[in-house]
Image: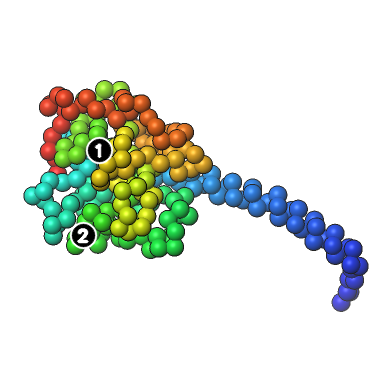
Amino acid sequence: MKKFKFSFFELLLIFAVTAIFAGVLIPVLQAAQQAQEKASCADQSRKLGAAFAAFAENNDGYLPRTQLGAEEKINGQIVLWTYNMINKGFISNENLICPDGFELLGDSWAKGKIRSLRSAKKNSDVFSYSFYGYNAIGAGGGYFGSKPVKLANISKIILTADSWDGNNYKIARYIGSSVIADKPTAGRGMVYPLHDGKATVLWSDGSVSDEVGGDFPHEAWEHGVFAVKSNWKSVK
């Protein structure tokens, strides 16, 4: 077998070329991974849109509430839309997880350690984890659900979006809030630009787009929709 002998300077040259190649290739691979994760997040949002449409089709055209009423608690715990829709078979746990968010969760919330939403029977509000927040002001409306056809300019009203929760300190995480609003309050998070300064937003007409930052105009939340009682219903 023929053996090759390299001088010290030739070895240095080989190492230098290898380092340069790695320096060029690694950012390309990272960019490709980020693009794939963003596409996956958009795909997840589209699946959520289809699930909301299916829910509405089976509930006289009404979207689900962000949470069920006090009389429908499980072991004294609030039942959020996530568990409600999973329990009824419209979505699965995987539909609520954005791959790009795992890096931001830290070790305690590393991939594979996200708590199963199907185990929410004992503590449904804590276990109803989601990277995607549901619009609590317009589409979800707290204890009421809306009819999409009654919402004005539905292509400009947020249905769900990448979210963060700065109020929930008990389980030491900030990325992901099941419910969002234009201002952070107890139990409500806000839109979070998870993908390189952009947030993946599912609009009420089913379309998906990447939006810069987390501030949206007043009409994106549709405050006025509940001024008309015919626009909402206490759906389960």
| Residue at which label 2 appears | 123
Q: Earlier in the sequence, mark 1 or mark 2?
A: 2
- Residue 137 location, quadrant: top left
For image coordinates 15% across by 31% down, the residue present is: 232
Please name the residue that numbered disc 1 is placed on: 136
Of 90 and 203, which appears nearest the observer? 203
State whether residue 194 appears in this view: yes
Q: CA distance from mark 1 to mark 2?
A: 21 Å
- Measured from the top left, where is residue 84 in percent x and y? 21, 49
| Residue 148 in the image: above or below residue 99 | above
Residue 182 location, quadrant: top left
Whole-percent x, y for residue 71 in the image: 8, 49
Residue at point 31%, 25% (across, down): 219
Within 10 Å of disc 2 (Cα), the crowding (few <14, some 14-19, many 20+) is: some
Total marks shown come to 2
Residue type indicated by callout 2: Asn
Q: In which quarter of the view is residue 183 placed? A: top left
Which quadrant of the rendered structure holds the C terminus? Answer: top left
Quarter holding the N terminus is bottom right
Residue at left offset 27%, top offset 41% = 185
On the rendered structure, is 175 left or right of 22? left
Drawn side of residue 163 relative to residue 61, left or right: right
Does residue 185 lie above or below 18 as drawn?
Answer: above
Q: Amino acid at mark 1?
A: Ala
Residue 49 in view (yes/no)? no
Q: Nearer the viewer, residue 31 or 190?
A: 190
Do the CB atoms of the residues marked 1 and 2 lie less than 8 Å apart? no
Judged from the image, the secondary structure of the residue bearing numbered disc 1 is: loop
